Image (tube, rainbow, N blue to C red):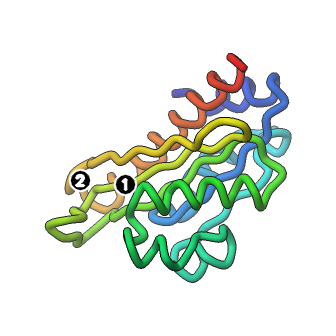
Amino acid sequence: MNVADLLERAKAQGVMIATAESCTGGMVAAALTDIPGSSAVVERGFVTYTNTAKQQMLGVHAETLAAHGAVSEQVAREMAEGALRNSGAQLTVSVTGIAGPGGSEFKPEGRVCFGLATGGVPTRTETVDFGALGRDNVRIAARDHALDLLSQGLFSLAQK
């Protein structure tokens, strides 16, 4: 997936993008802003590493965190929707997961949940188990998957 192409498509469509990141710590926003001219498309990025930050910056509900944990599609949904609500963007992606080391039987290392939000359609969520690839590789895989989701989101917006 070519990031420059993603940005060109977003610019052509008049779509601004925002990110809401936890385990990637801003890597998605960094990949987007590494490209000259990205300011025409990248509206902002939220790095919400703690649950408190998720609540304060994105409006993730304490009840959702308590019931499902930070690494869940429910939290990924609220993160993506919060980024949409708290920005001037038309397309947002969220990332929350366990890069490692560690994890548990129920939430293993390498599990990452994603959200993709845009106005007027239900927010898309999904979970990918990248496996115990090591912290750096899980984060890179999550970044790349989030960029792919943004590309898919642009395609969906173009079909509207």
Which residue is at 84% across, 30% downward? 14
Query: Residue 76: where, in percent of width, then height?
Result: 50, 57
In the image, 132 versus 73, the foreground residue is: 73
Which residue is at 30% across, 56% downward? 111
Which residue is at 38% across, 64% downward? 71
User: In this rendering, which labeled residue sits more in front, label 2 or label 1?
Assistant: 1
User: Dot 2 lies on which element?
Assistant: loop
Q: Does label 2 or label 1 sit earlier along the sequence?
A: 1
**In the rendered image of this protein, does residue 155 appear above or below residue 17?**
above
Which residue ends up furthest to the top in the rendered image?
159
Could you say which disc has been placed on residue 133 in the image?
2
How far apart marks 2 and 1 lie (CA) works out to 12 Å
Query: Residue 96: where, in percent of width, then height?
Result: 45, 61
Which residue is at 37% across, 68% downward? 68
Q: Does residue 55 appear to the left or right of 100 in the view shown?
A: right
Query: Residue 61: where, in percent of width, then height?
Result: 57, 73
Query: Looking at the picture, which amino acid does disc 1 mark?
Result: Val
Q: Does residue 20 appear to the left or right of 132 in the view shown?
A: right
Residue under label 1, please give it.
112
Could you say which disc has been placed on residue 153 in the image?
none
Quadrant including the C terminus:
top right
In the image, 4 versus 105, the foreground residue is: 105
**In the rendered image of this protein, does residue 154 appear above or below residue 57?**
above
Query: Looking at the picture, which amino acid does disc 2 mark?
Result: Leu
